[in-house]
Image (cartoon, helix red, strand yellow):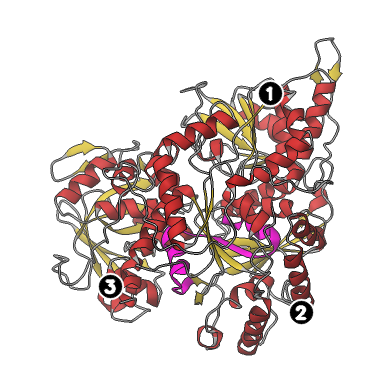
């Protein structure tokens, strides 16, 4: 299958390089690679970047992305929002990828067949919308969005958006790929300027060479341990130095993919010969040729003398395999110390399942390294001691590893190959064993929050490279170190693995596999097609615009201040988008806001009692689940607020975590700090996110308190430096005020005043 990509018919490089020259005249200083790419997509550099002030970390940029990619779960809400804008086609090339709705249970063929039946109405909706608006539709079975984007659409130096937090995976090809909510994607799809506060740029300087067992996965696991889940917030990670060029393109993609785990806006790398080789191997030679010329024009690498906000030094020669977890992707332990960690933690020294693949680690290189270990084990007479599941990242990968006898090598030692989809990585795993039991799984996935994979809060997911995960499957022990430890054999002898050997690209080239999964390139819109939504559907419903908090029809007596808000609850500790809007079985309601809102914050901890999914209605002094009390407030037309802890909304880019509280009447969330994507999603849906000026004030506000904004009028009337104070009235009548900070830009203020970003966009199109 020949898919020549974005740059063939119309290369953007001359335009981007010309725009970059305008940027240079304004800024007059050496630029990092991230700045070159980002600022060359600014709509008006002279207006947006001039003024002499600091850009990084301060200035909101008005950008024009070149592509949008959506997975099937997030695409539903994004398309419903796009449809309400009333346009006949997308303003930029857009694709839909059916990867999230396929549950892993029995194996690839049966799982895919079952998914086509259970999700047919959603797939029909997505396909009909794709036909109507000229969107490329990748059918169920085609693969995971991020792998397909890397194989088909990614190109050095471009800017693209994806409705999934791991969109940065495409950065392995030297571009800026940024995960966003559906409303942000709608900006690009409607041709509306997309806004982003210019991130800081952290340089990660790589020297040395990876040793025999260490991989790029170990590099990003190690870095996650250094930066923590908040260390990359508001920052782009830009890797440079001699250690970059020796890594495969797909290895760099693994690093970029898991940059999301430290909160980074995205990650990128200078153009390398391995990127060129990957473009040629994936039948995009003309893209490689165009990128070569852009590199010669110094577009695809940092300027000499470019300054970073921080530089992190990593010597690859000193890295050893690393295992991260449980329950957070930044708890990093070197493999040599992991056995002691297991013992000191009091865990059973058992692995209950090993899972490899996913969007993070399903490349040809990953699979050949794993197959090498499988062949070693088979020669020694070993089979996996635990369930061993393998998820190919795309149909192209599946077909190629099957042709090259990699699949058979895995199946020979007990592996089960799952469908080309997200599967267990996102909770789409029908797992019957270990329910309610503490157990440990090892995966090559990217995220390991509680309950994420199998719905069991006691399943500990430890993240590692595919080769470490595979080797552990043959021991069955959590403390096993394949670099040093032997495995006893039935004949009384012992076996030790030799370091795995993988291959970057297939010698015989990639094979496309089942081409019926793929869309025709650049389809034309078919305006006569009717978008399919079944009458009475429990999976899909048309969106009704949110009303404004202000003005006529708002029933707000306070003018341009928010109405008096009752605090629903104070949320304790880590609260990811998985906590706010769980995935797993709830994925089937992604296109039905009423139904999916029933899971609002159901795994969040109420700080005032320490209980999960408990809220108190102080008016009636009754206790209910969080959704129950939120719905009660909505029924009584009582707008409400949340008090939340640090890094609120980390994790997946699911905008439902903003849509659901807004649907139930939330108007304000007051946080110690926010994760980037979620804060933007809240703004898009008309919820005001405020930060405590003093984090100690978090504990002073609780359920039943009445909050009133003071100073919001000033902000809404155009004073971007306005200070917003919150007046707190306790149930006993005590009154005090607390200071807050905001990150609202001029355009974001317009969204708030209109009730949502989509309301504002629609008003500008009349």
Work out whether mark 3 precedes mark 1 in sequence or the reverse, and give the earlier one. Answer: 1
What residue would you read off at disc 1? 477
* Foreground: disc 3 or disc 2: 2
Instruction: Return the residue found at the far front.
Output: 528
Query: 581 or 643, which lies in front?
Result: 581
**Residue 97 in view:** yes
> Quadrant location of residue 269?
bottom right
Task: Give the SS element for disc 3.
Answer: helix
Measure the C-alpha gap from mark 2 to mark 1.
Answer: 53 Å
Q: Residue at x 80, y 10 (%)?
A: 490
Crowd band around label 3 with a 10 angstrom C-alpha radius: few (<14), some (14–19), many (20+): many
Q: Earlier in the sequence, mark 2 or mark 1?
A: 2
The residue that disc 2 covers is: 297
Q: In x, y percent, where is residue 262?
A: 58, 53
Q: Quadrant of the C terminus?
A: bottom left
Image spot of residue 609 (x, y percent): 31, 38
**439 sits to left or right of 444:** left
Residue 537: in magenta span: no
Q: Nearer the viewer, residue 416 or 635?
A: 416
Residue 173 in picture, x, y percent from top left: 70, 60
Query: Of label 3 and label 2, which has the lower sequence position?
Result: 2
Q: Secondary structure at mark 2?
A: loop
Residue labelled with disc 3 = 712
């Amino acid at each position: 299958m020949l898919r020549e990509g974005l740059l063939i018919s119309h290369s953007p490089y001359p335009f981007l390089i010309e725009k970059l020259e305008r940027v240079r005249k304004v800024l007059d200083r050496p630029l990092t690679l991230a700045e070159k790419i980002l600022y060359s997509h600014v709509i008006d550099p002279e207006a947006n970047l001039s003024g002499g002030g600091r850009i990084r970390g301060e200035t909101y940029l008005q950008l024009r992305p070149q592509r949008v990619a959506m997975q099937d779960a997030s695409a539903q809400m994004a398309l419903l929002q796009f449809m309400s804008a009333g346009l006949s086609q997308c303003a930029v090339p857009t694709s839909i990828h059916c990867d999230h709705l396929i549950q892993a249970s029995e194996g690839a063929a049966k799982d895919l067949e079952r998914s086509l039946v259970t999700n047919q109405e959603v797939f029909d909706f997505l396909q009909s919308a794709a036909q109507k608006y000229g969107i490329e539709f990748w059918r169920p079975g085609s693969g995971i969005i991020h792998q397909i984007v890397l194989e088909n659409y990614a190109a050095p130096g471009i800017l693209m958006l994806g409705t999934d937090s791991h969109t940065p995976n495409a950065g392995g090809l030297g571009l800026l790929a940024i995960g966003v909510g559906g409303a942000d994607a709608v900006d690009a799809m409607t041709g509306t300027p997309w806004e982003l506060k210019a991130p800081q740029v952290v340089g990660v300087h790589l020297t040395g060479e990876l040793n025999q067992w260490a991989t790029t996965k170990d590099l990003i696991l190690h870095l996650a341990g250094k930066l923590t889940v908040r260390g990359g917030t508001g920052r782009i990670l830009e890797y440079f130095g001699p250690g970059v060029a020796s890594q495969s393109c797909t290895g760099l993609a693994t690093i970029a993919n898991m940059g999301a785990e430290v909160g980074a806006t995205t990650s990128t790398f200078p153009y390398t010969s391995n990127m060129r080789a990957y473009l040629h191997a994936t039948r995009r030679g003309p893209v490689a040729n165009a990128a070569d010329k852009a590199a010669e024009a110094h577009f695809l690498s940092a300027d000499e003398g470019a300054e970073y906000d921080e530089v992190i030094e990593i010597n690859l020669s000193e890295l050893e395999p690393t295992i991260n977890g449980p329950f957070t992707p930044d708890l990093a332990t070197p493999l040599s110390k992991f056995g002691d960690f297991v013992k000191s933690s009091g865990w059973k020294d058992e692995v209950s399942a090993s899972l490899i693949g996913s969007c993070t680690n399903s490349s040809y290189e990953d699979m050949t390294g794993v197959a090498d270990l499988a062949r070693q084990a088979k020669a020694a007479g070993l089979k996996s001691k635990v369930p061993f599941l393998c998820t190919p990242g795309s149909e192209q990968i599946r077909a190629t590893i099957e042709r090259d006898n990699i699949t058979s090598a895995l199946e020979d030692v007990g592996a089960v190959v799952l469908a080309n989809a997200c599967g267990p990585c996102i909770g789409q795993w029908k797992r019957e064993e270990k329910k309610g039991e503490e157990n440990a799984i090892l995966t090559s996935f990217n995220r390991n929050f509680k309950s994420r994979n199998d719905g069991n809060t006691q399943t500990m997911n430890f993240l590692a490279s595919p080769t470490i995960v595979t080797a552990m499957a043959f021991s069955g022990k959590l403390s096993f170190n394949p670099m040093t430890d032997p495995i006893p054999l039935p004949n009384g002898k012992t076996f030790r693995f030799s370091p795995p050997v993988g291959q970057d690209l297939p010698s015989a080239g990639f094979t496309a596999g089942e081409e019926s999964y793929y869309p025709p390139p650049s389809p034309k819109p078919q305006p006569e097609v009717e978008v399919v939504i079944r009458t009475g559907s429990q999976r899909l419903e048309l969106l009704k615009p949110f009303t404004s908090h202000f003005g006529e029809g708002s029933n707000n007596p306070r003018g341009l201040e928010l109405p008096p808000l009752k605090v629903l609850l104070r949320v304790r500790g880590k609260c990811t988008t998985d906590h706010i809007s769980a995935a797993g079985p709830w994925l089937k309601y992604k296109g039905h806001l009423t139904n999916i809102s029933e899971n609002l914050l159901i795994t969040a901890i109420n700080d005032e009692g320490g209980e999960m999914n408990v809220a108190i209605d102080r008016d009636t002094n009754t206790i209910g689940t969080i959704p129950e009390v939120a719905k009660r407030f909505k029924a009584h037309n009582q707008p409400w607020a949340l008090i939340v802890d640090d890094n609120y909304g980390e994790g997946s880019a699911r905008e439902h975590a903003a849509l659901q509280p807004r649907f139930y009447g939330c108007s304000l969330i007051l946080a110690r700090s926010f994760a980037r994507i979620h804060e933007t999603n809240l703004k898009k849906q008309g919820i005001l996110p405020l930060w405590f000026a003093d984090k100690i004030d978090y504990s002073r506000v609780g359920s039943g308190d009445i909050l009133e904004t003071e100073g919001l009028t000033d902000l809404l009337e155009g004073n971007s430096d306005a200070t917003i104070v919150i007046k707190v009235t306790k149930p006993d009548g005590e009154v005090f005020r607390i200071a807050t900070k905001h990150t609202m830009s001029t355009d974001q203020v317009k969204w708030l005043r209109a009730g949502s970003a989509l309301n504002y966009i629609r008003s500008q199109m009349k």
